[in-house]
Image (cartoon, grey):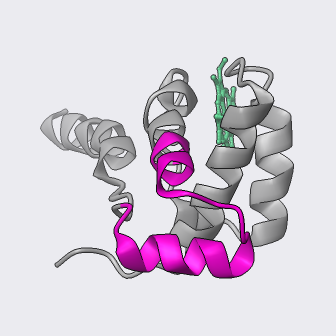
Amino acid sequence: MKRMLVVIAGLVLAGCGVVLAPVDPALVIEAQRRFPDATEVELLRGREVLRTKCAQCHGVRDPRAYDEKAWTFYVGEMSARATLTSVDKQALLRYALVARDAPLPP
Ligand code: HEC
């Protein structure tokens, strides 16, 4: 029984354990290499959307857990559930795609 509780606690915590890459100058440069009109404000918004609106039903999904094709698909699928505007959608996708490859803070 105790063991089972530990397993359940582990599963619950798993969703909270996702570390999202911070929007630092390196991330902004990388984003602008891919999307020339990306801005720091847009990336901050994308990170916030992922952290809040996209975590209403399940935990935060890790940008690293999906490839580019999967992210494009899931942002399309999930944006209606999270009632994202087209601005939110673009911000989220851009953040997720650059955060996938960004180094995490120590
Ligand atoms: C209204 C509830 C709800 C919201 C809001 C929501 N999701 Fe989901 N999400 C689900 C459910 C339920 C599933 C399980 C599979 C399915 O139904 O497609 C899921 C599955 C997923 C998956 C598939 C892989 C997995 O781990 O199950 C990803 C990735 C995902 N969501 C990302 C997002 C993103 C990104 C957002 C924000 C745009 C978001 N979700 C917002 C309910 C939601």
Which span of residues is magenta-colored?
23-46
> Which residue is drawn at the image coordinates 31% and 43% (left, top)?
16
Q: Is residue 81 above or below residue 60?
A: above
Would residue 59 be visible to someone looking at this image? no
Quadrant containing the C terminus is: bottom left
Q: Is residue 40 among the parts visible in the rendering?
A: yes
3 vs 40, left or right, is left
- Where does residue 63 sit, x and y in percent of width and height? 55, 61
- Residue 26 in which image quadrant: bottom left
- Give the total of numbered labels: 0
Q: Nearer the viewer, residue 89 or 16?
A: 89
Q: Is residue 98 above or below residue 75?
A: below
* Residue 31 location (% of width, % of height): 60, 72
Q: Nearer the viewer, residue 71 or 39?
A: 39
Q: Is residue 49 left or right of residue 97?
A: left
The reply to whether the magenta stretch includes residue 24 is: yes
Name the residue rendered at 67%, 22% in the picture.
82
**Residue nearer the viewer, 61 or 31:** 31
Q: Quadrant location of the N terminus?
A: top left
In the image, residue 21 lies in the stretch drawn in magenta: no
Name which quarter of the figure residue 36 lies in: bottom right
Which quarter holds ligand 1?
top right
Q: Residue at x 85, y 40 (%)?
A: 76
Q: Is residue 93 left or right of residue 17?
A: right
Q: Main secondary structure of the magenta part?
A: helix
Residue 84 spot, x, y in % from top left: 71, 24
82 relative to 7, above or below:
above
Identify the residue at horizontal 33%, vertical 36% (top origin): 12
